Image (cartoon, coloured by chain):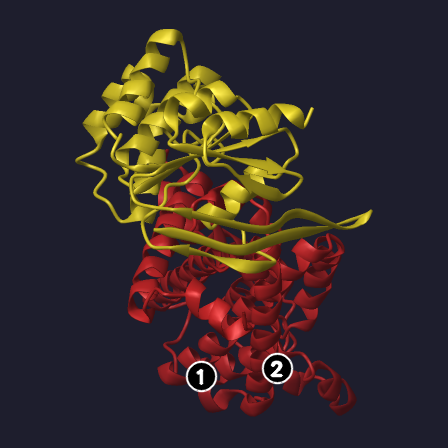
Chain colours: A yellow, B red
Amino acid sequence: MITITDLCKSYDTRQGEVTVLDHVNLTIKPGEKVGILGRNGSGKSTLIRLISGAEQPTSGSVHRGMSISWPLAFTGGFQGTLTGMDNLRFICRIYGVDANSLVDFVQDFSELGPYFNEPVKTYSSGMRARLAFAISMAVDFDCFLIDEVVAVGDSRFHEKCRIELFEKRKERAMIIVSHQPEFIKEHCDHAVVLVSGRLHSFEHFEEAQAFYHAQG
Amino acid sequence: MTIASTKSMRNKTPLHRSLKIQMRVIGALLMREVLTRYGRHNIGFMWMFVEPMMFTLGITALWTFTKMHHGASMPIVAFAVTGYSSVLLWRNMPARCVGAIQPNLSLMYHRNVKVIDVFAARILLEVAGATTSFIVLSVFFIAIGWMQGPQDVLKILLGWFMLAWFGASLAVLMGSLNERSEIVEKLWHPAAYILFPLSGAAYMVDWLPPAAQKVVLYLPMVHGVEILREGYFGSAVRSHYNIPYMASVCLGFTILAFTQERYVSKRVIPE
């Protein structure tokens, strides 16, 4: 169970203090898939960072009763001079898992071939994204954080990711943030809408969608 | 909800598990640092101590040829090795920690990677490099007879530890302050440059006039170098140092450093 209680986050800017999240409350049960709908600048990514623990709240708390992934398919953590293999080893060391047993899976899934042992700076953006997704799938979590639509690589690879995440891991909890109601509808049990830092919950998806569209 | 209950909800991981995770993360960062800084080509990770060795050798050669030491009785090679090694020890840690957060921001998307871990990995790497360089050079020069053996190894260890403590606390303090204002980085370079000749590496306090002695003994690292030299040369030199003074400064820096680190890590925004 993940329990988010009265979560607030504000930043000091040159215009003064800006409140990005305003008393957000949310509970995610094991296996539950929650979609967070929000427009650009509504605080979606901040919320994901706070849930993942990458950032600290200004007030309120996030109780993590299960293991939570880093934001899925995140490519920012790669060091260009290191190889795909080095980057896999680094992530495995951080999470305390054995890298050797995962090499085959990651190499196979990312379809990098011999490039797996070349520096990441020589990769195309598609190759980076494939490596990132493969590494995300290599470490096991109870709850996956998904920031925006997972659209990695071409349509064939896209389909491979969909099967890996939404079929093979369909019993896991997921928190998906997106500005596309269709994507949330397809994958989530229920949706909440984030509007300027406040979270609105709804019984049915259609109500959430109607509310979201009404925001203009 | 009170602050205390908020905190207890956030930190449910028991201490021994937290420590285990932190060791793991620092280890991972250390390996990453070694690979990105030194790579796998030619001598690889050995650059960690070969690089400081080259600095020390260069300074030793310079000082030998220019006969820049004032104390006629002082063996110049041992004087240079002890002096420049200690500079490398306390100066490289802050140099590596200033600006350490920015390039590692994206790693903080992984919850267990904290600002303090990034600092710790870089500090450990610098200590390991400077220490190995000091030991290898000393053993080498003693073996070929250019340096006498040390008089009091324990005292050398004490001096080395004090210098490392000073450097590490200064590193965390400077690294954290730099996140609040980039002026720190601008000021650090000239400060480190000017502090080098004042730091006791190139002189013994005893050689200075009493008025100057008083002034330089305000600098904490001078005490560390004096302890180190007394350990190395024994009664052949007259050392001036005050361990409680240096320890108090280091402790003060340490407390300040941790408060600043806390402030910064609570506000850090991963890229």
Rendered location of residue B260, percent (x, y): 62, 66
- Callout 2 amino acid: Val
Which residue lies most toward the top here? A155
Q: Report the disc number at residue B231.
A: 1
Instruction: Identify the residue at image location x=46%, y=83%.
Output: B233
For this view, does B136 lie left or right of residue B220? Answer: left
The image quarter in which residue A160 lies: top left
Q: Nearer the viewer, mark 2 or mark 1?
A: 2
For this view, does B222 lie left or right of residue B21? Answer: right
From the viewer's perspective, is residue B87 above or below residue A98?
A: below
Could you tell me which secondary element the residue under label 2 belongs to? Answer: helix
Of the pair A2 and B160, the residue shown nearer to us: A2
Rendered location of residue B97, percent (x, y): 57, 56
Instruction: Identify the residue at image location x=62%, y=74%.
Output: B256
Q: How many marks?
A: 2
> Which callout, 2 or 1, points at the residue further toward the start of the chain?
1
Give the CA separation, mark 2 to mark 1.
22 Å
Q: Is disc 2 surrounded by few (<14), some (14 to 19) or many (20+) residues within 10 Å?
A: some
Which residue lies most toward the left here? A101
Q: Chain of mark 2?
A: B
Instruction: Identify the residue at image location x=27%, y=49%.
Output: A96
Of the pair B27 and B153, the residue shown nearer to us: B27
- Callout 1 amino acid: Gly
Could you tell me which secondary element the residue under label 1 belongs to? Answer: helix
Which residue lies most toward the right here? A15
Which residue matches tag 2?
B249
Rendered location of residue A192, percent (x, y): 51, 36
From the viewer's perspective, is residue B179 above or below residue B144?
A: above
